[in-house]
Amino acid sequence: MSRALIVDTRRRPLHPCTPARARLLLKQGKAAVLRRYPFTLILKAAHAEAESTPLRLKIDPGSKTTGLAVVNDATGEVIWAAELTHRGEAVREALAKRRAVRRSRRSRHTRYRKARFANRHKPKGWLPPSLVSRRENVLTWVARLRKWCSIAALSLELVRFDTALMQDPALLGEAYHRGTLAGFELREYVLLKWNHACAYCGATHVPLELDHVIPRSCGGSDRESNRVPACHSCNQCKGNHSLEEFLQTRPAVLQGIQAHLKTPLAAAAAVNTLRWALYERLQATGLPVEVGSGGRTKWNLMSRGLPKTHWLDAAAVGASTPAVLHVDRVISWLISATGRQRRQMCLVDKDGFPRACAKTSSWVRGVQTGDMVRAVVPKGKRVGTFVGRVAVRASGSFNITTKVGTIQGVSAKYVTTIHRSDGYRYTQKGGRFLPTP
């Protein structure tokens, strides 16, 4: 069952409580809502007998979505779970647009100057901004959960697989890189690149073989750029024919394969870089960091009969995974990174000319655009209670975006902030049963 986080009067984390217990504490006035996301209660009176149980935070990093799970190793209960969606692609696209604008400005105004971009040097440990965004998202939530929950250990999925080392722990040196590992790494790379489907007929859930696009009898190499997965029948039919001869009656398939052969595994490369960067930063927290492989995570899921989702992947990371994971009533949070504010000072039209005034302070009467607010309007055209994200105006007339639409022209005097904007958007899978503050 998903639990509500709870802290004492000195904001020290206690053992999370059930939703029923949280409702009772709120109803009896013994606790108050400290944070809405993640939902956290604070006790109003000190209790000497209150104790905290050491918990483990498990992380399954991904290029687009990272799974998070807080697990009690002693009982196997998943206390809290979330799927964190990154905005790395949005960061990359924004930087590409900025680069285009700057190059255009240079060609128009400073084309006589000597180019200086070649003088820049990347420091050791440099990461692209899109990967920095992903790393900081995960580190932010690690810090938050450590603050509101008694996290005593961390688990991180660090590598996808290492079959050679599992088969022969003494395999080292050149044999390690060019022997058994090379074959398994190549096969897994090709299968992942082609989504475990036959490149020629698209068949899935069948035994796949690695076929040479340019046959070895015609001088083809064993590099990954010359290998595609193929079912047994397609592999036999192609034989020593060239790709153009074999697919001369299917030009669309031929064009697709030729284009996909040159496509790198950008997502896999990003995840590998992100995991090692995370590992270095997590070690600096001082907590013991357990690492595991993707193969162990998959085995843990299959042996416990669990479906594959991002947060369940996180719960199954590492050798410390309990024999039984209690996930029956866990409702995971869906957290999307949105960024805090726009750096653009003025909105422009399609031709790049300003179409609005420069933005002023984002704070108006103690409320900031993006805050979660509750507005209770007792009179006027918009009578009612509205909960949602606010967009402030200097005039004091705000817009509130709710689940049913946008309510315009709500006076600031009726608005109460219930959660400050922190650069993330929150929803829950399968509804909600946490107490409403």
Image (cartoon, grey):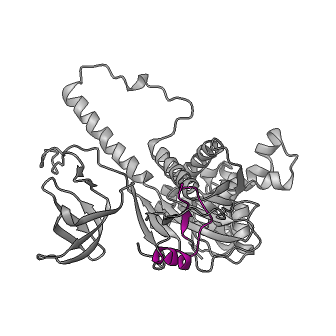
Image quadrant in which the N terminus is located: bottom right
Could you say which quadrant of the image residue 207 lies in?
bottom right
Q: Does the stretch in magenta take in 22?
A: yes
Residue occupying image coordinates x 54% and y 69%: 4
Tell me: 10 left or right of 237: left
Could you say which quadrant of the image residue 336 lies in?
bottom left
Pick whichever, 389 or 321, lies toward us: 389
Image quadrant in which the C terminus is located: bottom left
**Residue 224 visible to the viewer:** yes
Tell me: 349 left or right of 93: left
Residue occupying image coordinates x 27% and y 19%: 113
The x and y percentages for residue 363 are 25, 50
> Is 50 located above or below residue 436 in the figure?
above
> Is 374 located above or below residue 263 in the figure?
below
> Is 228 located above or below residue 231 in the figure?
above
The x and y percentages for residue 428 are 46, 72
Residue occupying image coordinates x 22% and y 46%: 361
Residue occupying image coordinates x 55% and y 58%: 148
The x and y percentages for residue 303 are 75, 74
Pick whichever, 53 or 262, lies toward us: 53
In magenta, the rendered stretch is 4-28
The x and y percentages for residue 6 are 55, 64
**Residue 212 visible to the viewer:** no
Tell me: 282 left or right of 31: right
Number of marks in the image?
A: 0
Q: Does the stretch in magenta take in 437?
A: no
Pick whichever, 248 or 50, lies toward us: 50
Could you say which quadrant of the image residue 233 lies in?
bottom right
